Amino acid sequence: MIEIVQNNSNSDLFQALGFTWDRPAVPDNVPVHDVKRACFRLQKMLAQYVFDASVLEGNPFTYPQVQTILDGITVGGHRLSDQDQVLNLAESTKKLLQLVKTGTFRLDKEIFTTLHAIVAKEEAFEWGHFRGEGDETNYTPHVGLGTVENYIPPATQPGAPNLNRIFSEGLGQLETLTNPLEKGLAFFLFGALQQFFFDGNKRTSRMMMNGVLMSNGIDAISIPATRAQEFNEKMVDFYVNRDATVMMAFMVDCHPDARLMQMVNEK
């Protein structure tokens, strides 16, 4: 009977989010620290975090150039839009840190759209609200998947009633998860799949993921620039198959305590 209840629970969860994964495969032994310590670590590696995130977006700035920009010095020879993307990533990360430090971070639409308004400012078609809640109510973006057919998310509608329903139902199911690592990873992929915004979905959803982690004393995850191709390949598989098992394992492997978690499991 317990197994039947668990399967029913997973079915509701998977249906609400739009994808499945092997839940027992997600580690529940991630080291937990003080919240301030988790925030301090991300703050100390701000330039690296911003650089890693910018590389995933195809931004040409090098790590030393990102450091220079964050020091308030302009770098010549690049488009202003690339520089603005770096600055937006830095400012949104600082905002995330402020929310977590003050205990005001929440896994909800208000925080989601607040962070998006900074992440995608002047870059997305519109920013700071769901698709359909602004002036554009018809255009639905497609996610390019290379050689396979593009992924088409839920349609943009005036007022975004369907996107708001999907978000509300998905969030309700996410709140049933007791493992913060699993909850954070699932929200990232939920946001990436449903494409609540015209652009900046993966960046903003990873911010939310790290907000969940740090609020629970778990170090943030940054996707190393050297693994950008691997990240993109696994995301394509996720969009095609709607199975997050491999993608979640990849994200866990990018966690700073990945090796420690593996050593504990091997004992």
Image (tube, grey):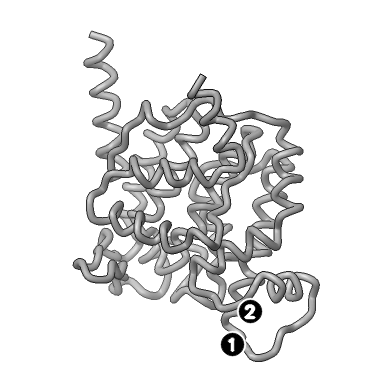
Of 18 and 248, which appears nearest the observer? 248
Q: Position of residue 248 (x, y in %)?
A: 41, 42
Query: Residue at position x 73%, y 31% from top?
Result: 34
Query: In the picture, which quadrant includes the N terminus?
Result: top left
Residue that badge 1 annotates: 79
As measured in the structure, the alpha-carbon distance from the residue carrying label 2 to the one carrying label 1 is 7 Å
Residue 153 lies in quadrant: bottom left
Q: Left of 9 or right of it: where is 81?
A: right
Measured as percent of width and height from the top left, residue 141 is found at: 31, 70
Furthest residue in direction top, as rendered: 1
Which image quarter: residue 259?
top right
Residue depicted at x 49% and y 65%: 56
Front residue of 252/182: it is 252
- The residue where tag 2 is placed is 83
What residue is rendered at 29% in x and 25% in y?
9
Which residue is at 56% across, 40% downward?
212
* Marks 2 and 1 in Cβ contact (< 8 Å): yes
Q: Left or right of 230: which side holds 42?
A: right
Q: Residue furthest left?
A: 149
Picture disc at residue 49: none
Closer to the camera in the image, 231 or 18:
231
Please name the amino acid that badge 2 sits on. Gln
Q: Amino acid at mark 1?
A: Arg
Q: Please tell me whether mark 2 sits on a helix, a strand or a loop.
A: helix
Q: What secondary structure is found at the residue carrying circle 1?
A: loop
How many numbered marks does the figure carry?
2
- In the picture shown, does residue 195 fall above or below 9? below
